[in-house]
Amino acid sequence: MEIKNTQVCVLTARGMAAIASVALAGDDAQTILEKVFRSSNPLPPSGYWPLAGGERIILHGSIVDGNTIIDEVVVGCEDDQFVIHCHGNPLLVEQIVKLCQANGATLVGTESFMSGTYQSQSADMIEAEAKQAMQTCATLSGVKIIANQLTYGLLPLAQTWLETVDTMSVQELWAQCHHVLRKTSRAKYLINRCRIVIIGPPNSGKSTLLNQLAGKDEVIVSDTAGTTRDWIQITCHIGPLLADIYDTAGLDAMLMQQHEIDSEAQQATMQLIRSADMNIFVYDITREHQAQSLLFSLGSLKTVIVANKCDLLTPRQRENIYSKYVRLCAKTGDGIDRLTQTLLVAMKVADFNPQTPVCFTDRQLLLLRQILHTKDKPTAKKHIETLLFGDNPV
Ligand SMILES: Nc1nc2c(ncn2[C@@H]2O[C@H](COP(=O)(O)OP(=O)(O)O)[C@@H](O)[C@H]2O)c(=O)[nH]1
Ligand SMILES: [Mg+2]
């Protein structure tokens, strides 16, 4: 029998794991599996696999190469794909993959495999994209937002657009698209990683704060100004966000003039600051004067301001000093929760409703922008159809 278009893919094994999963999907997946799998349970009499009715079964048995048993496995049969759960030894996994290849399957990477199987399983594009995006999404909150797009968010909204576009004014459609795009610019912080840059004068406690956020001593903390020459990046969770946090070289005009290396580092820091989703400006509360001019020179950057070393204030000073900024003691972590909450509010994700319609792929974004560029209803309708069904004719 000719083998058509069947793919094999290693789904989960990374390095050494107790269990690995090898997926097999495509027109002849069943034929290939019948050749390489010997079930230890009696099989249903009505043929090998109950796939047509959408049933799901789990079988126990062995992967065999002729008469040689390669591994004892469990096979999950779902929709039109089989997942062989085998032992995690990479040599075994490789043998099973090679056996599938020898029987006609093509080895593909996870992403390509997922997009192929999801598109064949899904009636519409947004659903296929959601299934795929949920696999690669950086955060749990992002997974929640994407899952909600199918029941409450973008999918039902686009379906309503398609039903009502003939009677709805173009302006109303544009207003709704604008709303989705505005919310998307917030949701992207939750769905993807975000970039947060810590800035401020030397010795104000930036590296101490980064260590505190990361929950470990990764960054050199020192009493000597200018210890962090370039920048250091750490990825960690801040509330629901997955953030790449950068600890930067001190922004200090004096240092800039004295040392070439700091001048270069500071130029690079400025670039990083401009590209940040949010900056945290840390200053030493006992040296407030030092911070003011630097803050002024930063202008209108997206910045949360943190007054650090609050532990050094006397109780009396603590009462008298008024600070509208986040009060922190980076050394002990006191105030970190306040800082987290302030960051989430500043990034407008503090109470993000996951049911809000948003775009979560570049394709969706592009189509919404195209709708915003058309005054012509039939064209707008075509874009909505493409959003829902892809480029295939409906
Ligand atoms: N008392 C006190 N000292 C701190 C605090 N945060 C940092 N420091 C100290 O300030 C000095 C400079 O800290 P560092 O994180 O290296 O500052 P950076 O140059 O801004 O990265 C170190 O001796 C830290 O231990 C704090 O909240 N309270
Ligand atoms: Mg430092």
Image (cartoon, rainbow, N blue to C red):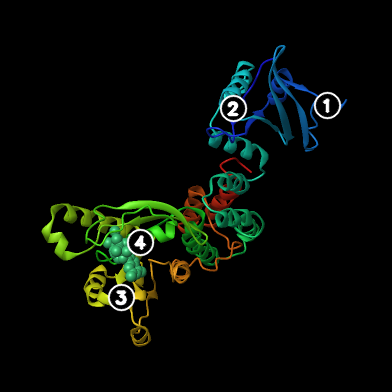
Lower sequence index among marks 3 and 4: 4
Disc assigned to residue 41: 1
Numbered disc in front, either 1 or 4: 4
Mark 3 Cβ inside 8 Å of ligand 1: no
- Give the SS element for disc 2: loop
Which amino acid, mark 4?
Answer: Thr
Which type of secondary structure does the marked residue at label 1 adopt?
loop
Direction from residue 233 to residue 228 in the image, left or right: left
**Reading the chain from its start, which is encountered first: label 2 or label 3?**
2
Is the CB atom of the residue marked by disc 4 within 8 angstroms of ligand 1's nearest atom?
yes
* In-front residue for pair 238/179: 238
Kindly identify which numbered label has been placed on residue 89. 2
Q: Position of residue 242 (x, y in %)?
A: 48, 55
Q: Nearer the viewer, mark 1 or mark 2?
A: 2
Is residue 95 shown left or right of residue 330? Answer: right
Calculate the distance from the C-alpha at mark 1 to the C-alpha at mark 4.
Answer: 59 Å
Q: Are marks 2 and 3 in contact (CB under 8 Å)?
A: no
Residue in the picture at 22% in, 73% down: 290
Comparing labels 3 and 1, the label whose residue is closer to the camera:
3
Residue 243: image tag: none
Q: Position of residue 215 (x, y in %)?
A: 45, 57
- Residue type pointed to by label 3: Ile
- Residue 144 falls in which quadrant of the image? bottom right
Pointer 4 local density, CA inside 10 Å: few below 14, some 14–19, many at least 20: many
Residue 208, label in figure = 4
Helix or strand or loop: what does disc 3 sit on? Answer: helix
- Answer whether labels 1 and 2 touch (C-beta < 8 Å): no
Q: What distance separates the C-alpha of mark 3 from that of mark 4?
A: 15 Å
> Where does label 3 land, which residue?
285
Q: CA distance from mark 1 to mark 2?
A: 25 Å
Of the 4 image quadrants, the one containing the C terminus is: top right
Mark 3 vs mark 1: which is more N-terminal? 1
